[in-house]
Amino acid sequence: MAFFLMRCLHHPDQDAARDTLRPDHRVWVTSGGDGLVSVLIGSALTDATGGSIGNFGILEAATPDDARRFAEGDPFARAGIVADIDITPLPDSFQAQRITDPMSPRL
């Protein structure tokens, strides 16, 4: 297993669509994409004015491809809200144990 930073930037003016899909997005996250990954922590990304511009997460996954499949399977991505997905491997020195309350079950 390895850890990844997932960063999803959204298309502009997607507030209404995000609001509609947020319950499905949260189910996806808390299930780890039906067990594909563990989501250790995540949140919305905002601009300087507090407007939502995307979301991020720290994921534990077997491969970068699994992390990307999780991001692409998110209801926000499937609905076309997401403009760009970036999956960045985190170093072996990443201290995942410091995250005490993961958002989905650990793999």
Image (cartoon, rainbow, N blue to C red):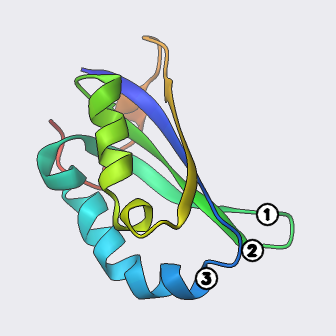
Q: Position of residue 107 (x, y in %)?
A: 14, 35
* Location of residue 26 with respect to 104 vertically, above or below: below
Q: Position of residue 78 (x, y in %)?
A: 37, 63
- List the residue tagged with mark 3: 15
- Asked if one can make out residue 101 in the rendered structure from this viewpoint, the answer is no
State yes or no: discs 1 and 2 in contact (Cβ < 8 Å): yes
State yes or no: discs 3 and 1 in contact (Cβ < 8 Å): no
- List the residue tagged with mark 1: 47
Q: Residue at x 24, y 70 (%)?
A: 27
Q: Residue at x 50, y 35 (%)?
A: 5
- List the residue tagged with mark 2: 51
Foreground of the two, 92 or 36: 36
Left or right of residue 49: residue 89: left
In which quadrant of the rendered image does the N terminus lie? top left
- The outermost residue toward the top is 92
- Asked if one can make out residue 62 in the rendered structure from this viewpoint, the answer is yes
Question: How crowded is the residue under tag 3: few (<14 C-alpha within 10 Å), some, or many (20+)?
Answer: some
Which type of secondary structure does the marked residue at label 1 adopt? loop
State yes or no: discs 3 and 2 in contact (Cβ < 8 Å): no
Q: Residue at x 31, y 28 (%)?
A: 65
- The amino acid marked with disc number 3 is Asp
- The amino acid marked with disc number 1 is Asp
Answer with mark 3 or mark 2, whichever residue precedes in sequence.
3
* Location of residue 74 with respect to 36 vertically, above or below: below
Q: CA distance from mark 3 to mark 2?
A: 9 Å
Question: Which label sits on residue 57?
Answer: none
Q: CA distance from mark 3 to mark 1?
A: 13 Å
